[in-house]
Every structure is written in structure tokens, then in C-alpha cells.
Amino acid sequence: MFDFLFSKKTQTEKEVYNYIRAMFGVRPKHVDLYIMALTHRSLSRKNNIHANIDNERLEYLGDAVLDMIAAEYLFKRFPLLSEGALTEMRSRMVCRDQLNKISREIGLHTLVKINEHVHSKSANGDAFEAFTGALFLELGYEKTKKILLQKVFFTRVDLDTILIENTNYKSQILTWAQKRRKKVLYKLLEDPKRVRRRRNARLYKVQLFINEKMIGEGADYTIKKAEQRAAEAGLEHIAQQKQKQYQKTVKQTRDYDTIYK
């Protein structure tokens, strides 16, 4: 399929092959496909012949496959839940933070190839999505679903805890803002320099404004997910500001005690 990328076996191919066989019990036929899934876009231009070889397209595919696996699993496990509740639980099951944790838990992060000068919080989770896309292309949906549920979600992830956690960051932002009578606005960036396209996949970027002040920015392949990322960044900003205010108050208290001792 992608055999033209590697004319002979390399150490990387051996490592990836052995990892897949040990972790998932599969003998991969197209190791180069999985290597592509583990290659961050920061290294996509290292090879002048194959300039666009990276994991973004596989990430796009894997994202859809994971959504489907999670949706089907939750639909069957919780037959009485509403569409809204199922959607919320699915977002918790395959959110970016969770995929990053899964990648580290199963050791996939050790195989991710990324430019040493690039610091990406989502690289490991993105690689897990791309890896899922590679599994889907080689094994099909049913086998990929069985492998990921049995080898990852049922054994390496505390699903019960994840499904009751509140990871709806937009809801948390809205609750916080309403209590303080603040205005919340999500703005989709349309600047062509800030919106990257890759064939049929478009990376949306969204900024979160509180009372016309930008406090968070997020990006993903759907607007809803980009808004969730922006809301998550906004919550981190609020927490940091709260911590700074606390430290300032503590300092002022100590200064006061020093003066009036």
C-alpha cells in the first residue's frame, strides 16, 4: 500500500512491528502505514521526495473511527440515555486529554516522531487517532473496534470514572460567566493564514472572549470540538489568574504583618 516509502527494513519498522504485535496481538502487513501514523507534521518536510508524508490525514480518519466506536459502545451500554447525554459521554471518552493519556498508558507515545524543537500538547493524542486510522485501513471497522475496546478501553482506561467526569468545558465556562454576569462569545477565525486545510480536512480555530477579552484559543477538525478546546484553555487562564490573585493577597498579608508587628 505504502511500501514505496521504505525500500528495506529499518530499526523503526522493527520497533513498530514488535510494538503492534505485542500490544494488540496483530501482525501488521503495512508497517509503513503505521510509521506514517506516528509521524508528526513537523517532520513531514524532512524528505524532499515525499514532502507531505505525516499523520494528519490518518488523524482525520481515526477521529471519525473513534467517534463511531465510542458512539456504538455507549448506545448499546446505556439504552435509556438521551441523545444529548450519549453525545456528552462520547466526548468524554475520546476527548483530546483522554487520548493523550491513552497514548502514554499503552506506550504509543514512545514511538511518536516529532521535531525536537516542537512542543505540542496534543501530539500523542493525535498520533493515537492516526494509529486508529491505520488500524481501520488495514483491518476494517469490526476488527479495529474489537481490538481497541478489548486491548485499550476495557483494560487500560477507567471508563466508569471518565463517563461521570465533567469535561464539558463550554458548560463550565457558561456557568462561571453567568454567576458573574459576564458575556461569553466564541469567534471562528477566518484568516486564511490561521486556517490550515489538508484536502477534505479543515482545521478550525476558535477564540473565546469574556466581556470582549480573549482568554482562550482552540483548534480541531470540527467547530464544536474547537470551541471545547478554546473553553478548556479559557478555564486554564481563569485558574492561573485566580492563583496569581491568591499569591498577591498572601504577599500583601505578609507585608501587612511585617509592618504592624
Image (cartoon, helix red, strand yellow):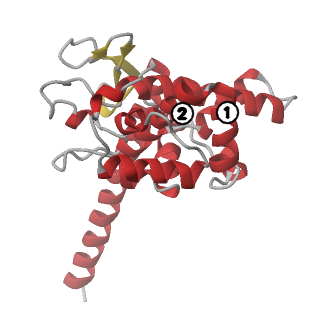
Horizontal side of 177 relative to 219 (left or right) equals right
Residue 235 picture quarter: top left
* Residue 172 left/right relative to 148: left
Determine whether label 2 and label 1 are within 8 Å by CB.
yes
Residue 104 left/right relative to 154: left
| Residue drawn at (55%, 43%) of the image | 27
Say if residue 239 shows up in the picture. Answer: no
- For the residue pair 163 and 248, the one nearer the viewer reads as 163
Which quadrant of the structure image shows residue 76? top right
Point out residue 197 in the picture as x, y percentages from the top left corner: 29, 14
Q: Amino acid at mark 1?
A: Lys
| Nearest to the observer: residue 80 or residue 77 | 77
- Decide which of tag 2 and tag 1 comes sooner along the chain: 2
According to the picture, the residue beneath numbered tag 1 turns out to be: 143
Viewport quadrant of the C terminus = bottom left
Query: Which residue is depicted at the point 40% across and 45% down?
Result: 124
Q: Is residue 45 visible?
A: yes
Q: Which residue is at the far front?
A: 8
**SS state under label 1:** helix
Q: Which residue is mark 2?
A: 135
- Answer with the quarter of the image where residue 54 lies: top left
- Residue 169 in the image, given as x and y percentages of width and height: 51, 37
Give coordinates of residue 205: x percent, y percent: 33, 22
Quadrant including the N terminus: top left
The type of residue carrying mark 2 is: Leu
Point out which mark residue 232 bears. Answer: none
Q: Residue furthest right?
A: 80
Separation (CA) of disc 2 from disc 1: 9 Å
- Residue extending farthest bottom: 261
